Image (spheres, rainbow, N blue to C red):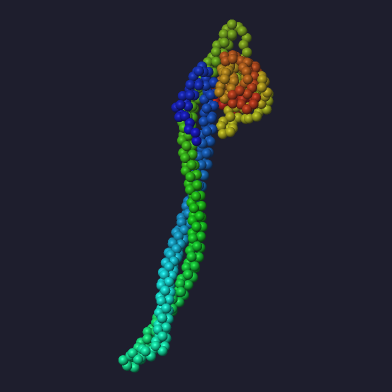
């Protein structure tokens, strides 16, 4: 939100603008009252914005808390799944290591079996060769028949032992092969289970991350709204301080207007007394009363007295073409005829008894400040100067400087 100038600077600027027209209290007061109305509108708008932001912050905070609870629940479930996944992967690693060890042992046993077979075959060949006709030479060379039998028995026993060794190695190899097959089957099951757990873990992590992202977005929005609320609250405090200062200035200007009206009344009384002393006939000044004013122009009322667009509309708007003669609602003295900020070309007529009328957005003047005008006399021509969206006459009635509904006097 764009920062505004501090109260002292704004008030000083208003006073500087008012300084050139120090002798023109109506213009000064209209300018400051316009600033007060604008500031009051900003105060109201800031208050409404603060209420909306406070409500929005409460809603966002509640949503963020709910999402945080859901994130924590998802985190707990994710932790369980990750623990299961780690355990399953550890089992899979152990099975891989077991398979590698079994493969190594199987390879060793297969080598041992091959050696045992080869030894058995060699032993069989030796026995066969021993039982051939050469055995006669072996028998003749023995010292006794008993030695021959012992030798043959030894050879047979060695052959049977080699056969048992080969059979044992074969059984061990086959058993290890079966065990390895079972290990492969177990590994396949654990691998499938690990994939399933990993998929569930990824899905759970994605759900957690999405909830966390939504929570973080809500927290960021809450921080932004808190910053905006703090800025609006600060601005509102500045607006309130400025209004207080400007209201004091407006009250001072109202006193100056009352003084100007009193001076005008004294001047009128002095002129009447002088005319009476000289024997001249004088007309009785009209006394304002409810229903005693005439309409400044003839046209439809497009905007009435009261709050409009969040601020006070202190008069009525009468739609007429540009250049339409604007007439004094009652007899009096013109105390303002000049440019006044949003009013554009403004004419203010003092009618005595603390009552004054204002005619704004004129295209030209027909009476200067200080001139005496009669009821119905042309004092300006309508237009669309100042803050205006089209040709019309903005008409105000002020009693003691305060705006009242003009319809009570027309």
Is residue 255 shown to the viewer in this render?
Answer: no
Q: Position of residue 293 (x, y in %)?
A: 63, 22
Question: At 44% from the left edge and 66% from the top edge, which residue is drawn?
Answer: 96
249 to the left or right of 403: left
Is residue 315 shown to the viewer in this render?
Answer: yes
Foreground residue among 64 and 272 = 64
Q: Quadrant of residue 133?
A: bottom left
Vertical placement of residue 280 versus 31, above or below: above
Farthest-out residue, bottom? 145
Question: At 56% from the left edge and 30% from the top edge, which residue is drawn?
Answer: 312
Q: Quadrant of residue 165?
A: bottom left
Vertical placement of residue 277 versus 387, above or below: above
Foreground residue among 142 and 175 = 142
Q: Position of residue 30 (x, y in %)?
A: 54, 23
Q: Quadrant of residue 404?
A: top right
Question: At 51% from the left edge and 49% from the top edge, which residue is drawn?
Answer: 214
Q: Position of residue 74 (x, y in %)?
A: 48, 57
Question: At 49% from the left edge and 37% from the top edge, which residue is drawn?
Answer: 232
217 to the left or right of 345: left
Q: Quadrant of the C terminus?
A: top right
Q: Position of residue 126 (x, y in %)?
A: 40, 84
Vertical placement of residue 180 versus 168, above or below: above
């Amino acid at each position: 939100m764009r920062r505004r100038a501090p109260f002292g600077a704004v008030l000083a600027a208003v006073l500087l603008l008012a300084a050139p027209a120090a002798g023109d209290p109506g213009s000064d007061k209209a300018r400051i009252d316009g600033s007060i109305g604008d500031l009051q509108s900003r105060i109201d708008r800031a208050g409404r914005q603060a209420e909306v932001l406070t409500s929005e912050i409460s809603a966002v905070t509640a949503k963020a808390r709910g999402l945080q609870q859901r994130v924590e629940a998802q985190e707990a479930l994710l932790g369980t799944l990750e623990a299961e996944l780690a355990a399953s992967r550890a089992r899979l690693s152990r099975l891989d290591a077991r398979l590698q060890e079994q493969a190594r042992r199987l390879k060793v046993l297969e080598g041992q079996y091959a050696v045992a077979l080869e030894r058995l075959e060699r032993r069989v060949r030796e026995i066969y060769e021993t039982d051939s006709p050469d055995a006669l030479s072996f028998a003749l060379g023995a010292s006794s028949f008993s030695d021959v039998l012992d030798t043959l028995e030894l050879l047979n026993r060695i052959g049977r032992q080699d056969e048992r060794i080969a059979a044992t190695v074969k059984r061990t190899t086959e058993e290890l092969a079966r065990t390895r097959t079972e290990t492969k089957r177990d590994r396949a099951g654990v691998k499938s289970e690990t994939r399933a757990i990993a998929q569930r873990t990824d899905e759970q992590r994605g759900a957690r991350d999405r909830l966390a992202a939504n929570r973080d977005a809500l927290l960021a929005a809450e921080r932004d709204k808190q910053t905006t609320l703090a800025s609006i609250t600060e601005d509102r405090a500045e607006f309130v301080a400025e209004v207080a200062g400007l209201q004091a200035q407006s009250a001072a200007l109202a006193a100056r207007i009352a003084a100007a009206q009193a001076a005008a009344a004294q001047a009128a009384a002095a002129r009447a007394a002088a005319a009476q002393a000289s024997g001249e006939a004088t007309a009785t000044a009209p006394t304002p009363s409810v229903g005693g004013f005439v309409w400044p122009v003839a046209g439809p009322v497009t905007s009435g007295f009261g709050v409009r667009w969040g601020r006070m509309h202190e008069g009525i708007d009468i739609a007429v073409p540009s250049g339409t003669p604007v007439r004094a609602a009652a007899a009096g003295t013109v105390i303002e005829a000049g440019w006044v900020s949003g009013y554009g070309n403004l004419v203010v007529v003092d009618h005595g008894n603390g009552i004054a009328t204002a005619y704004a957005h004129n295209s030209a003047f027909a009476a200067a400040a200080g001139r005496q005008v009669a009821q119905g006399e042309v004092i300006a021509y309508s237009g669309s100067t100042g803050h205006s969206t089209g040709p019309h006459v903005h008409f105000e009635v002020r009693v003691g400087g305060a705006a009242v509904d003009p319809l009570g006097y027309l």
